[in-house]
């Protein structure tokens, strides 16, 4: 438990968030009772609502807690995380959003199957969706353990188990039925929970006469203590620092388009145009949100230098209590705890649904001998597996920072789905064999690097850097493999490629895009 | 190893298995009918089956696919086929017929056997060998007979598809005359008292018929299908007034789902008919729900009418044409044809307990897009 934080507001906030989430999930369906408002009930989701939903699902515990903590400890080079997490949507907007929607695919494996007409590539994509999902869930569960442990005390493992159960119940009971409304609500909740305390804390800082961070408070050479070093946007360590920075940029810019829980939300858009508008709005919403963690980090430098060394992930939760005494601090603490919990709950639920969908379709839903589970049971069993595996890893794995693990999930996604989507949408020459080669090379390379990072601690600095941030080498390698093998198997370009490409790129309503009369 | 061999039987047994297996490999291609593409895929296995150096498949005008030796004789094929067509039956040709002057050519002679579908020659199977033997003639004839059988099955498949298409067309044209008559009657009754409403209803009527009669595309989105249902219900409501009460609850996530054209509207029509027929006092309450369930969308149409005997429904879904609910059986058959047998209609009903029809469609299926 973080000193100076009272347990009660945290518990209350978490209960309120959970209740609100479940409530909107169950009662959020639009219902019309007279024929006259049929139109309202069957109206498609507007880009504004959908953009809020995508942002709500996307902004995870890593964004809410991890980003501020990293900035506090390591300085401005960590700004690349929020910048990259936002800019990923720019790449998505320019290259992927509208064609992906027009393809009619619901999940990434669907897209691969529709584009390449290959069950094998589909299966490879399913494996990757599960892998990326688990890698992304892992830091969520770790982060949630931190939140609960900080807010109500007790050992972190206990908190992790509790939150895993909450997510499992939420998903398996069908509590995310009207998921668009739930996630949109979560976005505004998270933004409020971070924005209001930030404004109050800034006012307090002005009131205190705008103090600057005391130089050298730490006395530990491992951390850049000078204000100047802290504000340097390139990581420490010369060439290695430069590599780390660029690799992070590659992973986050290119990885967003391959996140399974983000991609499925685009299906809600009625057409490609709406998908593009939605992405543009997401860019704005996510961008506004990411302005706030640096504020916390900068204030933390002034008011909470002791957190730099231990538990920097708890900075956002502790800062209001440290800066605002009395009941004001208590209320603000409740707000941030609630927001952090919402961040964890929405992203985890979205991920578990995405993984359980894939598992339910391709694994638990298949027949074992004579027995075959029905759709709902297969989905629930899938959800159980989806939660259990990362939960076990979170309880046994080493202590790797929340944002680092998220970075690894982005790296795997960037090394596999980014080449598949970009080449699949923009290059006619892609073949099933080529796609498979790229997915295997990128997936094995970045996946192995992730596992080694989670379970080992290489002493060599360069090796550590290459494993910790694999994107800068794994993305080009995967891209080259995909293009190279496709060129070698040139004869095997799927027969329907031209027709499919026309559908991807022709706006709806034009003679090209619509089916032949 | 030896135990394994014993279990597979004698050499003769294994030869039989191998032959059957080769035939099974050729079958899927032939089941698509006789085209250059399917012939290309099948001809390799047919050559294994016949064991001759070269094998070719032709249609009635010329070559479709060739495997193995002797492809310098390509240009002779049309004239040989013409000879077979003149007098249908298996015929052997020697090297003079093939104009073969190469002494060592492994395909100096040919045996052509006609492929017959519905008493009509659709092509030939040609086996080329250095010498024509009685065995080769017999084998070619037998294989040609088997290929003909597969092609007849292909014909059956395609006529089944055509029948399904005809049924969809029939369903489109199936706006019941009663509905047209009753709608126009209801609209007429508003012309004097409420001209605006009459005009509105006429426009809805026009839109509804345009959607139902549209020609292009087998698939539509759930949003469009719901729009047509809304128009249909507005027209029915003009007639029945407050007796018809409809509740609609839709998860907006599934509005973009592509699904077979007119696969929900007939269910609503059934519900209106049964719901209002049922009880004079209550009844007429219809609930339409579309839910987002993982990778599927689930659409339910629920009425509180008279209900039905489950056995009756079972017979309708099994395709009993003599019964009255054409729509239900047709929708079920089309859903199964598109998505497989896991996605048929589910009907929950009992006499006096109303009826609930459940449609389940995957959000994505290859080849299905609106």
Image (cartoon, rainbow, N blue to C red):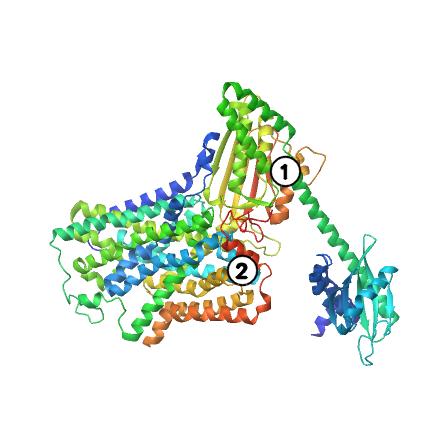
Residue corresponding to mark 1: B172
Whether callout 2 and callout 1 share a subunit is answered no
Residue B54 percent coordinates (x, y)? 77, 72
Q: In which quarter of the image is the N terminus of chain A?
A: bottom left
Chain on which label 1 sits? B
Residue A40 occupies quadrant:
top left
Q: Residue at x 28, y 50 (%)?
A: A337
Q: Is residue A23 left or right of residue B290?
A: left
The image position of residue B47, as x and y in percent, is: 76, 69
Look at the image and tell me whether residue B308 can be seen.
yes
The answer to whether residue B353 shows anywhere in this view is no
The residue lying at 53 percent from left, 32 percent from top is B231
> Which chain's residue wears label 2?
A
Please give the label number shown on residue B310. Answer: none
The image position of residue B245, as x and y in percent, is 51, 27
Decide which of A454, B297 is in the foreground and name it.
Answer: B297
* Residue B204 at x, y percent in the picture: 53, 31
**Nearest-to-viewer mark from 2 and 1:** 1
Specify few, some or many for label 1: CA neighbours under 10 Å numbering under 14, 14-19, or 20 or more: some
Q: For the point 44% across and 54% down, which residue is it?
A: A97
Badge 2 element: helix
- Circle 2 packing at 10 Å, graded few (<14), some (14-19), many (20+), is many
Numbered disc total: 2
Q: In this view, does A36 lie above or below A346?
A: above
**Which is more toward the observer, B207 or A210?**
B207
- The residue labelled by disc 2 is A122
């Amino acid at each position: 438990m973080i000193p100076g934080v009272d347990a009660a507001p945290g518990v209350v906030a978490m209960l309120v968030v959970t209740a609100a989430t479940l409530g909107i999930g169950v009662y959020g369906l639009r219902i019309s009772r007279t024929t006259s408002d049929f139109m309202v009930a069957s109206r498609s989701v507007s880009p504004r609502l959908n953009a809020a939903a995508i942002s709500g699902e996307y902004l995870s515990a890593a964004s809410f807690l991890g980003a501020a903590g990293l900035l506090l400890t390591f300085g401005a080079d960590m700004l690349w995380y929020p910048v990259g997490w936002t800019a990923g949507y720019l790449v998505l907007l320019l290259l992927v959003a509208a064609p992906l929607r027009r393809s009619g695919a619901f999940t990434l494996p669907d897209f691969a199957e529709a584009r390449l007409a290959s069950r094998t590539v589909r299966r490879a994509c399913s494996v990757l969706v599960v892998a990326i999902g688990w890698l992304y869930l892992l830091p969520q569960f770790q982060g949630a353990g931190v939140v609960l442990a900080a807010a109500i005390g007790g050992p972190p493992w206990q908190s992790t188990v509790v939150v895993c159960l909450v997510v499992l119940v939420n998903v398996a009971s069908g509590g995310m039925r009207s998921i668009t409304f739930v996630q949109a609500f979560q976005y505004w909740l998270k933004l409020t929970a971070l924005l209001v305390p930030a404004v109050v804390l800034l006012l307090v800082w002005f009131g205190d006469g705008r103090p600057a961070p005391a130089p050298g408070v730490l006395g530990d050479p491992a951390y850049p203590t000078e204000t100047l070093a802290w504000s340097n946007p390139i990581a420490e360590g010369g060439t290695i620092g430069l590599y780390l920075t660029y690799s992070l940029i590659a992973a986050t810019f290119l990885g967003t388009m391959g996140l399974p829980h983000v991609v499925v939300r685009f299906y809600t858009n009625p057409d490609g145009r709406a998908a593009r508008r939605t992405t543009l709005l997401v860019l704005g919403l996510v961008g506004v949100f990411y302005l706030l963690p640096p504020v916390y980090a900068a204030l933390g430098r002034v008011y909470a230098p002791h957190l730099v060394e231990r538990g920097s992930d708890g900075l956002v939760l502790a800062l209001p209590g440290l800066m605002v005494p009395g009941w004001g601090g208590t209320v603000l603490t409740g707000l941030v705890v609630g927001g952090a919990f919402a961040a964890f709950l929405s992203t985890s639920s979205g991920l578990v649904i995405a993984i359980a969908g894939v598992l339910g379709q391709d694994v638990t839903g298949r027949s074992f001998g004579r027995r075959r589970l029905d759709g709902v049971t297969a989905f629930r069993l899938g959800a159980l597996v989806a939660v259990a595996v990362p939960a076990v890893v979170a309880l046994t794995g080493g202590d790797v920072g929340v944002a680092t693990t998220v970075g690894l999930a982005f790296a795997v996604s960037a090394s596999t789905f980014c080449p598949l989507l970009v080449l699949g949408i923009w290059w006619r020459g892609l073949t099933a064999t080529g796609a498979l080669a790229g997915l295997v090379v990128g997936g094995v390379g970045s996946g192995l690097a992730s596992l080694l990072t989670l379970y080992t601690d290489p002493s060599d600095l360069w090796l550590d850097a290459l494993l910790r941030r694999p994107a800068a080498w794994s993305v080009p390698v995967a891209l080259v493999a995909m293009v190279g093998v496709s060129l070698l198997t040139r004869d095997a370009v799927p027969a329907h490629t031209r027709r499919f490409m026309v559908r991807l790129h022709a706006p709806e309503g034009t003679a090209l895009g619509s089916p032949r009369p | 190893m030896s135990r394994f061999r014993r279990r597979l039987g004698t050499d003769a047994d294994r030869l039989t298995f191998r032959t059957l297996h080769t035939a099974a490999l050729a079958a899927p291609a032939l089941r698509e009918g006789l085209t250059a593409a399917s012939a290309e895929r099948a001809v390799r296995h047919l050559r294994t089956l016949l064991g001759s150096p070269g094998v070719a498949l032709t249609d009635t005008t010329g070559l479709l696919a060739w495997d193995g030796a002797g492809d310098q004789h390509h240009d002779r094929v049309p004239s040989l086929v013409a000879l077979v067509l003149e007098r249908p039956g298996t015929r052997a040709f020697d090297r003079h017929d093939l104009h073969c002057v190469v002494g060592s050519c492994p395909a100096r002679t040919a045996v052509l056997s006609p492929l017959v579908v519905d008493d009509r020659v659709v092509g030939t199977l040609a086996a080329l060998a250095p010498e024509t033997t009685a065995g080769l003639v017999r084998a070619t004839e037998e294989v040609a007979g088997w290929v003909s059988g597969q092609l007849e099955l292909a014909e059956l498949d395609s006529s089944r598809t055509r029948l399904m298409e005809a049924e969809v067309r029939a369903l489109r044209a199936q706006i019941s005359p009663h509905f047209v008559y009753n709608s126009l009657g209801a609209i007429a009754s508003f012309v004097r008292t409420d001209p605006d409403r009459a005009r509105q209803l006429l426009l809805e009527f026009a839109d509804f018929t345009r959607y139902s009669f549209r020609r292009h595309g087998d698939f539509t989105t759930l949003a469009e299908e719901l729009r047509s249902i809304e128009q249909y219900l507005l027209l029915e409501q003009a007639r029945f007034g407050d007796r018809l009460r409809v509740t609609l609850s839709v998860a907006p996530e599934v509005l973009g789902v592509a699904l077979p054209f007119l696969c929900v509207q007939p269910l609503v029509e059934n519900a209106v008919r049964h719901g209002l027929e049922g009880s004079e006092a209550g009844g007429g309450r219809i609930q339409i729900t579309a839910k987002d369930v993982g990778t599927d969308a689930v659409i339910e149409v629920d009425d509180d009418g008279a209900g039905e005997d489950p056995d009756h429904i079972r017979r309708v879904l099994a395709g009993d044409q003599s019964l009255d609910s054409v729509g239900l059986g047709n929708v079920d058959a089309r859903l199964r044809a598109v998505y497989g047998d896991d996605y048929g209609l589910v009907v929950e009903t009992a006499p006096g307990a109303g009826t609930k029809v459940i449609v389940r469609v995957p959000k994505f299926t290859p080849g299905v897009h609106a």
